[in-house]
Image (cartoon, rainbow, N blue to C red):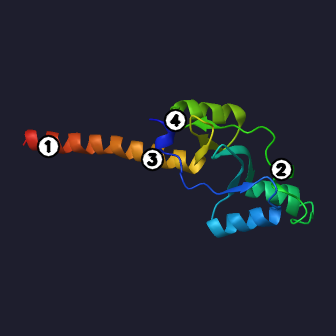
């Protein structure tokens, strides 16, 4: 299965100059725990970083920093890990594990942001696959019962 099939396409994003107050409001209003930081280039939104609710708590709230005085570029992740929409789920999960990240932006062939995949997305997809396997077992048992009366 390709990661582009399970990623969330409705990505919340901001520019590099958005204040942490704006980022926090975006998260609250969109009911998400992360915001992808993007730059516009040739009609594409290119992801350059990511901010999480944890970043806000640890780096702004816990340090009593004024959230309107810090911008996204100051706090976003230093090394952004992305995935290509055509990569397999397995390859993306392996990279997430190797880098120790719980979410990564998914990009098209031009590097433009098209989605994001999170641990929640992966667990949901795995759950659906396991349920399908469970259905095979149940159907097999039913058919055997019908044949062996």
To which quarter of the image does residue 10 belong?
bottom right
- Does residue 148 appear in the picture of this structure? no
Rounded to the nearest whole Å, what is the CA distance between mark 2 and mark 4? 29 Å
Sequence-wise, which precedes: disc 1 or disc 2?
A: 2
Rounded to the nearest whole Å, what is the CA distance between mark 4 and mark 3? 14 Å
Rounded to the nearest whole Å, what is the CA distance between mark 4 and mark 1? 37 Å
Marks 1 and 2 in Cβ contact (< 8 Å)? no
Which residue is at the front of the view, 83 or 129? 83
Numbered circle sitting on residue 145:
1
Sequence-wise, which precedes: disc 2 or disc 4?
A: 2
Rounded to the nearest whole Å, what is the CA distance between mark 2 and mark 3? 36 Å
Rounded to the nearest whole Å, what is the CA distance between mark 3 and mark 1? 27 Å
Vertical relation: 125 (above or below) 56: above
Q: Residue at x 82, y 61 (%)?
A: 20
Q: Position of residue 105 (x, y in %)?
A: 63, 44
**Residue identifier under label 2:** 73
Q: Residue at x 80, y 58 (%)?
A: 56
Which residue is at the front of the view, 122 or 24? 24
Q: Residue at x 64, y 32 (%)?
A: 95
């Amino acid at each position: 299965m390709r990661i582009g099939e399970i990623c969330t396409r409705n990505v919340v994003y901001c520019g590099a100059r958005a204040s942490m107050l704006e980022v926090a409001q975006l998260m609250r209003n969109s009911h998400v725990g992360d915001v992808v930081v993007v730059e516009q280039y040739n009609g594409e939104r290119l992801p350059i970083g990511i901010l999480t609710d944890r970043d806000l708590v640890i780096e702004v709230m816990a340090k009593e920093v004024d959230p309107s005085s810090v911008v996204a570029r100051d706090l976003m992740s230093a090394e952004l890990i992305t995935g290509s929409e055509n990569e397999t789920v397995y390859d993306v999960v392996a990279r997430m594990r190797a880098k120790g990240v719980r979410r990564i932006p998914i990009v098209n062939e031009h590097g433009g942001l098209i989605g994001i995949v999170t641990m929640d997305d992966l667990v949901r997809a795995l759950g659906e696959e396991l349920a399908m396997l469970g259905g095979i077992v149940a159907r097999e048992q039913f058919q055997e019962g019908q044949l062996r009366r």
